Image (spheres, rainbow, N blue to C red):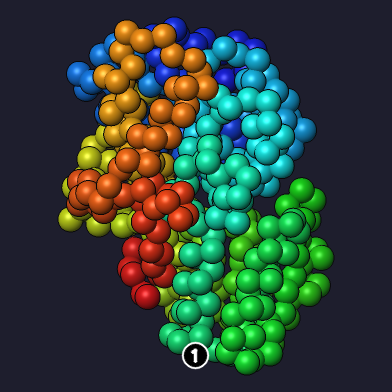
Amino acid sequence: MGSEALESLNISPNSLSLFQIGDAESACFTEISAGIRCALRHLNIRPAFKFCKINLHSINDCNDKMINEQIIDTLAKKQIPKIIFGATGEENLGPIFPKLLEKNTNFMALFPYSFNKNFKNYYLKNIVLGACNREAELDKILTFIFYKLKKRSDILFVLPKTNFGLYQRNLIKMQFDLLKITHPSFIFYDEDSNSVLGLLKQVNKKFKVIVGLVSVQPMKKIIFYLLKQKANPPVFIGTENFYHLHTAFEPFLQKQMTRGLQIYFTTSFPHPKNTEFKIIREYLKDLELLNDAEGECNKPSILSFNYYLNARITGIAIKRLLPKIQGLEISNEDFIKQLMKEFQSIEDQNFEDFLIGFDRKNHCAYYSSPNIMFGSKVIY
């Protein structure tokens, strides 16, 4: 499914609209869209949503911050509750949100690609996070390096050239200081430039561990660059987007991993192959139904399942809210405020074999406890 033009959005008065904003050409955008849409198909056939369907509108910002801001400005003028779901994270949305909430309180961001609890002081009240808590993932990666891999030196971190990248660097330095060991090496990558030449000039064979906290494409080029040098490659570790390197789309890397290449990634979710979870079985069935109905060929993935789960949890909050506001005249601002209360009221419960419950400290709709994965296996 492609993206929609913002000016021509067909928004039904008897529906609730979710807006996905991001780079429509990226694989992540497509996977996130598929996960959300198959969850909404699951929800919309339920009696609770008979008179209020939930629709997803996917809008392309071309990974351009100016276009992103224009989209937000246009949305702000529409007289509907603005629920931005699975949107570009703090790189694009972050700088806009604080200014936006000074004028509009009818905006809500659900499960953006990546945010961290450091933002809670000024506008986290209108954001619900998922398991993409970069601080929790970073803690897990560092623990894995120190205590599982038993590495204390020759470690390189590739970070985004942003304020958040600097923030992550400071967190990493603090952890190394606590252990009284020398700081690792850092390289900052400008995602806007799409150039990895500067990265490759700074990468050499001495590093034993390379941690990529940027998008997967520059890290993939680093991996190939080092493999071509025919040296013993380092251990590579990344966040959820690294799982792409373990798929059939990367046959060369798959072959290298059978020969000892180590590429790990973090995730807080069961793998889509792990069908002992009821929520996984429902996801696979709903994804198949979406493909059949839309003539698409979406494949199961961790990222797609991530947003399927996010959308199902959103369904819980909306289902609780609808009977409370039925027949009432309610402003967009009050709708957003009441919906946030419903998220916050989610207590510990077993949701189709997956534990959910609102974490007020991190503003997560479920508890984030990342694992280190190698393919579909939990390593740590």
Residue type of the residue flagged with mark 1: Lys
The answer to whether residue 310 is visible is yes
Residue 153 lies, in percent from the top left, at: 63, 90
Q: Quadrant of residue 97?
A: top right
The image shows residue 295 at horizontal and vertical percentages of 37, 25
Q: Residue at x 45, y 8 (%)?
A: 12
317 is higher (above) or lower (below) than 189: above
Q: In the picture provided, is 41 more to the left or to the right than 216? A: left
> Mark 1 Cα within 10 Å, few/some/many (few <14, many 20+)?
few
In the rendered view, tell whether residue 82 sits above or below residue 317: above
For residue 39, above or below residue 354: above
Residue 217 percent location from the top left of the image? 63, 56
The residue tagged 1 is 150
- Residue at image position (36%, 48%) is 358
Q: Residue shown at 53%/15% (left/top)?
A: 80
In the picture, the quarter occupied by the C terminus is bottom left
Quadrant in the rendering for residue 40: top left
Q: Is residue 247 at least partly visible in the picture?
A: no
Closer to us: 364 or 225: 364
Q: Nearer the viewer, residue 38 or 294?
A: 38
Q: Identify whether 51 is placed above or below 295.
A: above
